[in-house]
Amino acid sequence: MNLILFLCAICLLGLAALSLQAGAAGLDNTAPAFDLPQHGGSRRVQLADLKGRIVILDFFAHWCVPCVRASTEMEAGVRQYYEQRQGNTHGIQLELLAINLEASRPEKTEAFIQRTGLKQVWDDLQGEVFQKYGGSGMPFLVVIDVTGGKSGDVPARVVYRKAGFEGVAKLRQVIESIGETPA
């Protein structure tokens, strides 16, 4: 029980640190490139391969208690929701990439994946992508607009990043705003 309380305290400290960091100047909204291996497979995914889509990065670790709820709700309330609707209201397809940060205890990671129902799982076992995107607490979620804007030439940009889970409604609001024409 003490271990769980300790891990929750670490997650909360990360949330506070990210809130301070997000308020400070210097967090660029250009999405850094990434190249991640498939968890337990041979495929790889790169940000460049996802052009024309909305990409959500859901960073998790098997020991992160709040990650269970976040990943479960992300899978059902975001990935499945937008898959059934064939994209957001502007017709933009969505990719949800669950990203495992934990190399130890692979059996625990497998149990987490089964429990949450995650479909696309990738590994960032050194935490490089997590750090590139400013991660400091978990769960850590990032929404990236890879549509290229009206001209198609705009670089991929981070439109949302958050340590902690604000719920599916907040993420749907962010997702629906991608592709809107400014008034």
Image (cartoon, grey):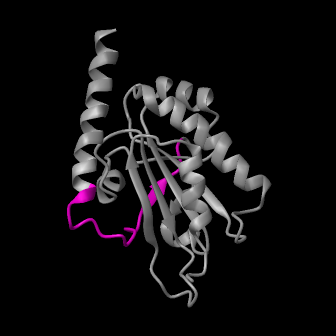
Magenta range? 22-39
Please tell me whether residue 52 is drawn above or below residue 41 in the rendered image. Answer: below
Picture residue at 63% right of the left edge, 42% below the top: 75
Give the tally of numbered discs: 0
Quick one: quadrant of the C terminus?
bottom right
Picture residue at 42% right of the left edge, 66% below the top: 158
Q: Quick one: which residue is furthest to the front in this view? A: 183
* In-image side of 64 versus 38 (left or right): left
Task: Please state which of residues 60 and 39 is positioned toward the viewer in this rendering.
Answer: 60
Image coords of residue 157 (percent x, y): 44, 71
Task: Please state which of residues 42 and 45 is positioned toward the viewer in this rendering.
Answer: 45
Task: Answer whether residue 67 is visible to the viewer in this image.
Answer: yes
Task: Please state which of residues 96 and 15 is positioned toward the viewer in this rendering.
Answer: 15
**Residue 110 inside the magenta-drawn segment:** no
Picture residue at 74% right of the left edge, 54% below the top: 83
Quick one: quadrant of the N terminus?
top left
Task: Answer whether residue 42 is visible to the viewer in this image.
Answer: no
Image coords of residue 39 (percent x, y): 52, 43
Q: Quick one: which residue is furthest to the top in this view? A: 1
Picture residue at 26% right of the left edge, 30% below the top: 10
Please tell me whether residue 128 is drawn above or below residue 17 in the rendered image. Answer: below
Which SS type dominates the magenta stretch?
A: loop
* In-image side of 79 versus 21 (left or right): right
Image coords of residue 59 (percent x, y): 44, 44
* In-image side of 112 versus 123 (left or right): right
